[in-house]
Image (cartoon, rainbow, N blue to C red):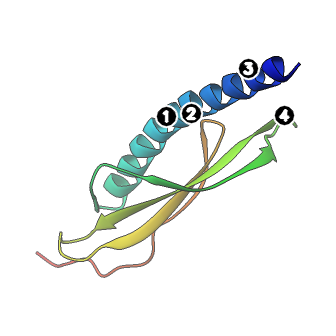
Amino acid sequence: MLEIGFTILLVLLAWFWFDSMGTREIAIKQGTSLAERTNLQFLDESVACSRVSLARNHRGHVQLLRTYEFEVSASGGERLSCNLTLLGNQLQSWHIPPYLQALH
């Protein structure tokens, strides 16, 4: 019985890891898109997952709700801390703080 429980745990951990890697790629694409739409530079081409929880989608199905932190810059010098939230693979919310845009 212990072997079955251990096997199930390993399968769940492997699924979570693979699902997280795919969702991270979606978060990178969404972060890059948000930065471009706000005339900012997406820094480091990376995001970090800061929170994982369960939530219901519009159909009532339970999905993973993940919040990712990332950084952008208006001029390349300063870094602005931002975040986005994905429910499953769908963007639910995002935050980019106000910034002063350099005049050219």
- Mark 3 or mark 1, earlier in chain: 3
- Mark 2 or mark 4, earlier in chain: 2
Q: Which residue is drawn at 66% across and 37% down?
A: 88
Q: Residues at badges 3 and 1 in contact (C-beta under 8 Å)?
A: no
Q: Residues at badges 3 and 2 in contact (C-beta under 8 Å)?
A: no
**Label 1 SS:** helix
**Label 2 SS:** helix
**Camera-side mark, 3 or 2:** 3
- Mark 3 or mark 4, earlier in chain: 3
Amino acid type at image mark 1: Met
Q: Residue at x 27, y 54 (%)?
A: 44
Question: Residue tagged by mark 1?
Answer: 21
Label 4 crowd (10 A; few <14 / some 14-19 / many >=20) = few
Question: Residue tagged by mark 3?
Answer: 7
Amino acid type at image mark 2: Trp
**Camera-side mark, 3 or 1:** 3
Task: Tell me where residue 81 sits by quadrant.
Answer: bottom left
Q: Which mark is residue 61?
A: 4
| Residues at marks 4 and 1, CA–CA distance in whole angstroms | 22 Å
Q: Residue at x 36, y 55 (%)?
A: 37
Q: Residues at badges 1 and 2 in contact (C-beta under 8 Å)?
A: yes
Question: Residue tagged by mark 2?
Answer: 17
Q: Which residue lies furthest to the left in this view?
A: 104
| Residue 91 rendering spot, x and y as whole percentages | 58, 46
Q: Residues at badges 3 and 4 in contact (C-beta under 8 Å)?
A: no
**Label 3 SS:** helix
* Left or right: where 90 falls relative to 31: right
Amino acid type at image mark 3: Thr
* Left or right: where 2 falls relative to 33: right
| Residues at marks 3 and 2, CA–CA distance in whole angstroms | 15 Å
